[in-house]
Image (cartoon, rainbow, N blue to C red):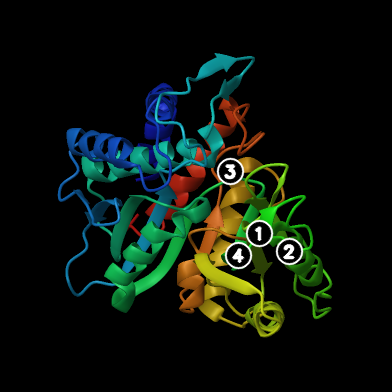
């Protein structure tokens, strides 16, 4: 099998690059991945993959030797990008790089995963457990990990572990950064800026609330906890006392207890404003669970060390561990061993100038192969 996979990696490098280019030209905002999902399904089927289907969350799932009673391992990479564009944004190759919005986050990783699905379909190695290959939906922003939630729910009772291909090769995510995202709206009577001067202004009240939220002192407990007002809007005109104003507010932490503390402070501030007579409405627009930092899980440690060994062997560089918000937040929250690793190197992620090194795809392709074939008989 080793000779077969090494030949496959060498012979199909150009095919991988072409697949990345094709995928980059299919827009896939979160919740609108239909076209990319259909492409992935059709492409896998054309490579001989059997039983490929698209689920209710727009996940493209290729279950390989996943009999009903077999334990399974999930390998996933998210199809969606942060960009709302519904028209192709283009891709160019220049100076050993590929440039395209979303090329590294997460299109190149999706392409490598599909190429490994192709390898399984063509070579039919005997697996030691079920292998689920999934191009999943809704990882970015207010996608709220919809695809990961549906996937973990489908296989949860027999799920051994999860590997998400996302981001760059230089770090392994082994800890979930959870988040809560809120839309906070304040309404007041408002009025004319001159004749009704003195009436309560929704913008001012909202700004005062934001200031109070920023008085919170994050816990010094070894975790990293953050908060942010990311957007604020409201009012009617320069000569109107604002009747309505709203903001988007986010809390993040890599530790569940720390997250609960900052949430408690947020809820306290909201209640104090309501008690003072201010009309405040709060809507949860995003929720990503986190695990308990520092939990001792033997199977988790084994998976982390396996990934570290393979990445360092194939890339020739030392690899560290980090906390992040990824599709693995969902398995982490259930105590299921999981890691998120990238299969390329690049920069300017989440901008329209995003790029990856073409040469970084060679070790990335090999890393994915080593990990997936670890669950096959050699």
Q: Which of marks 2 and 4 is in front?
A: 2
Cα distance in 3D space between marks 1 and 2 = 6 Å
User: Which element type, helix, strand or loop, lies under badge 4?
Assistant: strand
Task: For label 4, count other residues whose C-alpha is less than 10 Å away and answer few (under 14), some (14-19) or many (20+).
Answer: many
Instruction: Please state the horizontal and vertical placement of residue 350, each as a whole percent of the image.
Output: 60, 39
Instruction: Please state the horizontal and vertical placement of residue 323, each as a whole percent of the image.
Output: 66, 63
Quadrant in the rendering for residue 266: bottom right
Q: Is residue 77 left or right of residue 305?
A: left
Q: Which of 358 and 77 is in front in this view?
A: 77
Residue at the disc numbered 3 = 314
Residue at the disc numbered 1 = 190
Residue at the disc numbered 4 = 187
Residue at the disc numbered 2 = 199
Measuring 24% from the left and 42% from the top, which residue is drawn there? 123
User: Which element type, helix, strand or loop, lies under badge 2?
Assistant: loop
Quadrant in the rendering for residue 32: top left
Cα distance in 3D space between marks 2 and 4 = 12 Å
Measuring 30% from the left and 56% from the top, which residue is drawn there? 57
First reached walking from the N terminus: tag 4 or tag 3: 4
First reached walking from the N terminus: tag 1 or tag 2: 1
Q: Is residue 209 left or right of residue 220?
A: left
Q: Which of 93 and 206 is in front in this view?
A: 206
Q: Nearer the viewer, mark 4 or mark 3?
A: 4
Instruction: Please state the horizontal and vertical placement of residue 9, each as a whole percent of the image.
Output: 42, 33
Above or below residue 358? Residue 233 is below
């Amino acid at each position: 099998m080793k000779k077969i996979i090494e030949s496959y990696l060498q012979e199909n490098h150009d095919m991988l690059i072409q697949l990345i280019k094709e995928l980059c030209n299919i827009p896939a905002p979160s919740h609108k991945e239909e076209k990319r999902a259909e492409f992935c399904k059709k492409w896998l089927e054309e490579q001989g993959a059997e039983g490929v289907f698209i689920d209710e969350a727009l996940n493209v799932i290729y279950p390989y030797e996943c009999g009903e009673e077999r334990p399974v391992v999930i390998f996933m990479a998210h199809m969606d990008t942060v960009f709302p564009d519904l028209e192709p944004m283009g891709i160019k190759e220049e100076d050993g790089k590929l440039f395209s919005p979303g090329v590294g986050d997460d299109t190149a990783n999706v392409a490598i995963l599909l190429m490994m699905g192709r390898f399984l379909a063509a070579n039919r190695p005997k697996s030691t457990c079920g292998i689920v290959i999934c191009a999943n939906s809704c990882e970015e922003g207010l996608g709220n990990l919809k695809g990961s939630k549906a996937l973990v729910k489908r296989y949860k009772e027999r799920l051994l572990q999860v590997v998400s291909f996302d981001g760059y090769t230089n770090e392994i995510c082994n800890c979930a950064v959870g988040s809560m995202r809120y839309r906070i709206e304040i309404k007041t009577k408002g009025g004319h800026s001159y004749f009704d001067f003195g009436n309560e202004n929704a913008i001012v009240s909202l700004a005062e609330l934001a200031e109070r939220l920023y008085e919170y002192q994050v816990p010094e407990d070894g975790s990293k906890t953050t908060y942010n007002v990311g957007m604020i809007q409201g009012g009617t005109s320069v000569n109107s006392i604002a009747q309505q104003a709203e903001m988007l507010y986010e809390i993040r932490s890599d530790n569940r207890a720390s997250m609960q503390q900052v949430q408690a402070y947020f809820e306290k501030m909201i209640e104090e404003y309501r008690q003072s007579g201010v009309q405040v409405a709060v809507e949860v627009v995003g929720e990503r669970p986190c695990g308990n930092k520092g939990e001792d899980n033997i199977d988790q440690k084994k998976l982390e060390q396996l990934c570290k060994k393979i990445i360092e062997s194939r890339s020739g560089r030392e690899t560290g561990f980090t906390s992040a918000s990824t599709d693995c937040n969902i398995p982490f929250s259930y105590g299921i061993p999981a890691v998120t690793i990238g299969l390329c190197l690049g920069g300017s992620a989440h901008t329209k100038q995003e790029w990856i090194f073409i040469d970084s795809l060679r070790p990335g392709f090999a890393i994915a192969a080593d990990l997936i074939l670890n669950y096959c008989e050699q």
